[in-house]
Amino acid sequence: MSRHIVSVLYLCGIATAFIPSPNVRHTLFSTTRLLAQEEATFGMGCFWKPSEELLKVPGVIDTVVGYTGKQSTEAPSYDSVCFSREWVEGVRVTYDTSVLSYEQLLDAFFQCQEPAFNGSRQYASFIFPHNTEQERLAQSWLQQNADTNSIISGIGRR
């Protein structure tokens, strides 16, 4: 009887050895997606909630929050951000260009932002292009949405 149980367990082990692991499929899928990834950066007000909202957009792979906008090599501190007119709370977005275009991401940025109008640049709304193509598309998007967009401060430098 025990020999029979061992044989059955052995056969089950062989049968499951050829079922691909979900982790392996995910790893292979993720590797192929790297070719279609780009990054975009936005000032969206307080960055926590907009960062989480962007993660719900199909095609958004990851978001990272931080400070951007000041042309400096110094690392920002919370005090330097709060009392500066240069730093902006930013969200860097990694997205899959085969699923989501930059223009669609700009639409999502507009819907997800939460700028604060307290006189501080820290919570301002900005588009920070990573390249000339993103800058061109951002300028075009701002012109097309000029009537409905009164809260985006403009295009900034990272």
Image (cartoon, rainbow, N blue to C red):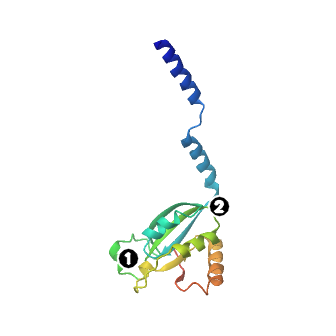
- Residue 59 to residue 111: above or below: above
Give the number of marks: 2
Q: Splitting the image into 4 quarters, where does residue 117 fall?
A: bottom left
Position above or below: 41 against 119: above
Residue 35 point in image, percent of width and height: 64, 55
Q: Which x, y percent locates residue 156?
A: 53, 79
Residue nearer the viewer, 89 or 10:
10
- Residue 81's label in the rendered image is 1
Name the residue type under label 1: Val
User: Would you call the spot at circle 2 few (<14 residues within 10 Å), some (14-19), or many (20 or more)?
Assistant: few
| Residue 86 in view (yes/no) | no
Q: Which one is in front, 110 or 139?
A: 110
In depth, the one of 36 and 108 nearer the eye is: 108
Q: Are marks 1 and 2 in contact (CB under 8 Å)?
A: no
Residue linked to disc 2:
99
Q: Where residue 129 appears, x then y in whole percent?
A: 58, 73
Task: Give the image quarter of residue 24.
Answer: top right
What residue type is disc 2 on?
A: Val
Which residue is outermost to the front?
Answer: 1
Front residue (pair 26, 90): 26
Residue in the image at 52% along x and 84% along y = 151
Instruction: Calculate the distance from the C-alpha at mark 1 to the C-alpha at mark 2.
Output: 34 Å
Quadrant of residue 136 within the rendered picture? bottom right
Question: Which tag, 1 or 2, sits closer to the chain's start?
Answer: 1
Mark 1 vs mark 2, foreground winner is 2
- The single residue placed furthest to the left in the displayed view is 79
Q: Is residue 140 above or below residue 95?
A: below
Q: Is residue 120 visible?
A: yes
Mark 1 neighbour class, 10 Å CA radius: few under 14, some 14 to 19, many 20 or more: many
Question: Left or right: where does residue 145 sit relative to residue 8?
Answer: right
SS at badge 2: loop
SS for tag 1?
Answer: helix
